[in-house]
Amino acid sequence: MNSFTIRLRFHGDLPFFLGSKISTVERRLSEKTSVKDVIEACGVPHTEVDLIVVNGRPVNFAATLAQDVGVDIYPPNQARSLLWENLSEIFACSASTSFTIQLPKIDNSSTLLRPRIALSSPATGVC
């Protein structure tokens, strides 16, 4: 397998665990690795992470990294702030827009659970 680069951006207070004020870290890998292992190899405990976004898509700790990607890692408070920002955009979209928020079932696994939000507008079908 060819080597690849993972660019990690730690948000909120997470750079504290890196031992510097730098919030972006690049790692060169030569084999598939879970996102959890990469984060913890940087010194950030997985218990301090609430949201992981790989190339713009939320993933759980078991997601496998096997190619060049950008990874954003958020602590609990900042992840909740992002959710509220997105919800405010939804509400601002239109008074006639309907939306559905589907909350996942809670279990005792270490899997990150994310709500799913669906939008529709009577006129166009989307906002």
Image (cartoon, grey):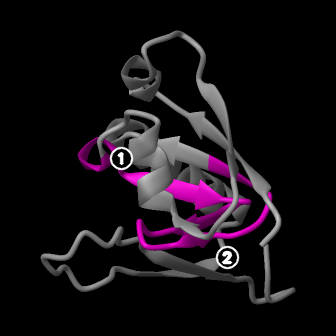
Question: Dot 1 lies on which element?
Answer: loop
> Residue at 64% of width from left, 31% of height from top?
25
Per the image, the residue denoted by label 2 is 96
Residue 113: in magenta span = no
Please tell me which residue is depicted at 38% across the width and 45% down the height of the picture. 40
Image point (60%, 46%), residue name: 72
The answer to whether 84 appears left or right of 66 in the picture is: left
Q: Residue furthest top?
A: 21
Quick one: 117 or 11, which is closer to the camera?
Answer: 11
Percent across and percent down for residue 75 are 38, 39
Name which residue type carries label 2.
Answer: Ser
Foreground of the two, 105 or 41:
41
Q: Which residue is mark 1?
A: 49
> Range of the magenta residues?
46-71
Looking at this rendering, what residue extends furthest in the left direction?
108
Locate residue 59, reporting x and y percent.
Answer: 52, 69
